[in-house]
Image: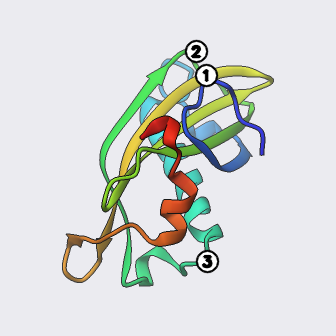
Amino acid sequence: MSQPETLPGNALFHSEFSLRWGDMDALGHINNIMYFRYFEQVRIEWYESLEFGSLEKSASGMVIVDNHAEYLKPLVYPQQIHLHMAGHSPGRSSFVSTYTITADGVLYSRGSARVVWVDQSAGKSVPLPDKVRALVSDTQYA
């Protein structure tokens, strides 16, 4: 899977879709909160690709405890965007996920989020699943 060189971590997932007209704000560009929704969408698609089942029905799953976005260039409708997700720096129950949004080879946004694995019923962190740890482990980021 290719990814922009500006994305730190091990490549995890890539998705693409068309921007929606309703994602724009009064200033005529994509509203800043939508970037977090795009990051969320690629993160959920990645989670589902690991065959854990649906997030809302799993005994354990991921929550976000810290979220960041850097807006490098405004996105505007209509446009096809590419989202890349990577991961690094695993801890006992968490890792850092990183994201880029590109279109036509241009980098529009970078983001990151700390993903924590939790026991859904207890509301407490649990160790990362072995397959997730294997995907995000890399001595370069340790």
Find residue 132 and report its horizontal and vertical position in percent: 51, 64
Tag 2 and tag 1, C-beta contact below 8 Å: yes
Q: Is residue 100 left or right of residue 33?
A: right
Distance Cα–Cα, label 2 vs label 1 = 5 Å
In this rendering, the answer to whether 37 lies above or below 81 is below
Find numbered disc 3 in the image and state the secondary structure of the residue it sits on.
loop
Residue 19 visible from this viewpoint: no
Label 1 near label 3: C-beta < 8 Å? Answer: no
What is the three-letter code of the residue carrying label 3? Glu
Q: Is residue 97 left or right of residue 123?
A: right
3D distance between C-alphas at marks 2 and 3:
35 Å
In the rendered structure, which amino acid carries the disc numbered 1? Tyr
Residue 37, above or below 119: above
- In this rendering, which labeled residue sits more in front, label 3 or label 1? 3
Mark 2 crowdedness (10 Å alpha carbons): few <14, some 14-19, many ≥20: few
On screen, 122 above or below 125?
below
Q: Between disc 2 and disc 1, whose residue precedes?
A: 2
Report the side of 78 relative to 96 (left or right): right
Whether residue 39 is visible here, answered yes or no, is yes
Q: Report the residue marked by disc 2.
A: 73
In this view, the residue in front, 104 or 114, is 114
Can you tell which quarter of the image residue 94 is in?
bottom left
* Residue 57, horizontal then vertical, whole percent: 43, 84
Which mark identifies residue 66?
none
- What residue is disc 3 on? 51
Question: What residue is shown at x 51% (from left), y 51% (from top)?
Answer: 137
